[in-house]
Image: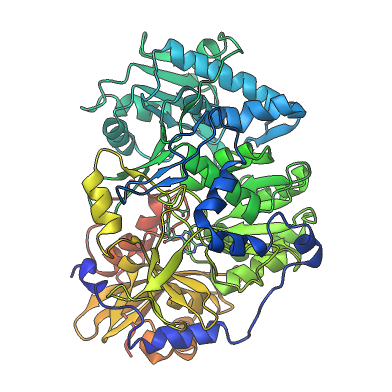
Amino acid sequence: MSYARDVTGPLGKGDVVSNESLANLLKEERRFAPPADLAEQANVTAEAYEQAKADRLGFWAEQARRLSWETEPTQTLDWSNPPFAKWFADGRLNVAYNCVDRHVENGLGDRVALHFEGEPGDTRSLTYADLQREVCKAANALVELGVRAGDRVAIYLPMIPEAVVAMLACARIGAPHSVVFGGFSADALATRIEDADARVVITADGGFRRGKPSALKPAVDEALTRPGTEKVRNVLVVRRTGQEDVAWQEGRDLWWHEFVGRQSEQHTPQAFDAEHPLFILYTSGTTGKPKGILHTSGGYLTQISYTHHAVFDLKPESDVFWCTADVGWVTGHSYIVYGPLSNGATEVLYEGTPDTPHQGRWWEIVQKYGVTVLYTAPTAIRAAMKWGDDIPAKFDLSSLRLLGSVGEPINPEAWIWYRKHIGADRTPVVDTWWQTETGGIMISPLPGVTAAKPGSAQVPLPGIAATVVDDEAREVPNGSGGYLVLTEPWPSMLRTIWGDDQRYLDTYWSRFEGRYFAGDGAKKDEDGDIWLLGRVDDVMLVSGHNISTTEVESALVSHPKVAEAAVVGATDPQTTQAICAFVILRKGSAEGEGLVEELRAHVAKQLGPIAKPKRILPVAELPKTRSGKIMRRLLRDVAENRALGDVTTLTDSSVMELIQSKLPAAPSED
Ligand code: 6R9
């Protein structure tokens, strides 16, 4: 049965389960008001909502003044050919200048931009002046390789400072970068090189992961044997691991330390049009080839700079910001590179995994650098919950004043754990909803304004228009669910899918006339606050009821023995689909007799009998993408005993073998 069919059913209509469960989640009426001291000094106050409501475009025009333009824009939005937006179209700027040089010119050259922490424990701090020198050298190197404004450069690197330098060097010369996550296969890299028609690839011999060197260059060599990649002239290779057996193609391959190393530290940035392409970032569609999401310069940087300032309340003189994302994910682009650096922040960049060499590594890093603002994903929070409260308790986390979450709905249980065990029951938690396509944060509490509700992203940011609609595009009343849509263009919106305008129209703008369809299910509670319910493709249809995976997962995780849960609907002759749950147990919870029954009863009690999972399988790990999203598609394959679909974007492919080895388990009967 195809999933596409199920999503056509209206979410939330006759959907008792979801409404009940929402009421359930909210029953304790837990609200967390902003701490008084933070609220008093907050970068953004409630006034911003009023101001943006009164004059949305005027509001964004004002935010654009956060940047240094070579030519100030006089136009804000050109929406004459929707949905192809132009923002600040007659303005000209250089993105890298805004992220680096202007801070040096303002006397901040000695401020640390990046505290790099390698997985083996090696460290390196780069000031803004250091970053300027490195970016200039890399820009000169690309120019020497014949890269011109408009040419695409593929970046396939571990989480090392050169990744940031390479991106900024591309931005500086107007060459759109396409960063490919270092965990992707040669195939995934080849498709992306071909689609973007890249001329140069920047990579490394390897990076450190889980305590050992993990090679990258062989995947590049392999990718470049594939048809469609012939136009790649050069491969620039950073020496990170020092592995001895790096294969080399003379004339094509160049060591970064030699070639970039001998370049001049001077480079004069040239301004580009606000709509000049800044980067392409591929997101895997559920079907077909990955979509190259295109972002441009002026509007993107305006919204990223503003949202980083507003949502993280960033005080560049005193804060130490740490976004744990990989640069290969949009979160790394926007909240490691362009947001923090455009705001002159000091930030941490960490190469490795959270549990190498021990499960307290992140908390040790927070303590070491005095991190004040931490931005991570629910999957990492749930992993920390699973490892145990005693681990973060060993470290001094008192520098933290604000926590953020992104990537998936954060279940109330994890939200509360995060605030309590990482944020000392004191810090606000901002749950930020956005997408590769939106470029920057769209829906989130403001830390100095919003009384936070665990589990809800709550309200669109000032200047952003979002709502929830039913099948017929009618806005749903408070207390109901439907589809999340964005009703007005926003500065950091994608401009198109690279090379495929039609697919851009079809994917995002055809479902609801004149509105951007995000592909997520959502609900508005009685206060009008927005709760994200997961991708509509994942919604389950059980005996005529639409049930969201997020809600059943949340109910499971609210049981003290469950650390993490993934829920899918598997074809079922009686009920159309049957709920099948995969659960990871918390440390110390045994898989013993009766556990499955206990969990099923727990869900039934929380959400009603219809939402009771038919099968529950305790597993050691769940299949995830690098950004921590559970790949439910693969779990459906398992639940329906099918061969696995595309696994190229999986972080760890052995996970699926482990899960499959659990099957066939006798389905528990009602
Ligand atoms: C930034 C990013 C986008 C999808 C999005 C939604 C999910 C992201 C979320 C969230 C609930 C949040 N998502 N943040 N769901 N609450 N705070 O993740 O971009 O990788 O393109 O994924 O992630 O389903 O549509 P991307």
**Residue 46 figure quarter:** bottom right
Q: In this view, does 516 lie above or below 147?
A: below
Viewer-proximal residue among 648 and 653 = 648
Q: How many labels does the image show?
A: 0
Q: Is residue 164 above or below residue 400?
A: above
Residue 57: image x %, image y %?
50, 52
- Please name the residue shown 24% across and 60% down the image: 510
- Please name the residue shown 31% across and 72% down the image: 473
Residue 457: image x %, image y %?
54, 67
Viewer-proximal residue among 476 and 454 = 476
Image quadrant containing the C terminus = bottom left
- Please name the residue shown 55% across and 80% down the image: 527
Its colouring scheme is rainbow
Viewer-proximal residue among 564 and 661 = 564
Q: Is residue 143 above or below residue 437?
A: above
Q: Quick check: 650 left or right of 528?
A: left
Residue 395: image x %, image y %?
77, 54
**Residue 20 in sight:** yes
Image quadrant containing the N terminus = bottom left
**Residue 324 in sight:** no
Q: Is residue 177 above or below residue 561?
A: above
**Residue 666 figure quarter:** bottom left
Residue 169: image x %, image y %?
51, 24
Q: In which quarter of the image is ligand 1?
A: bottom left
Q: Quick check: 475 left or right of 211?
A: left
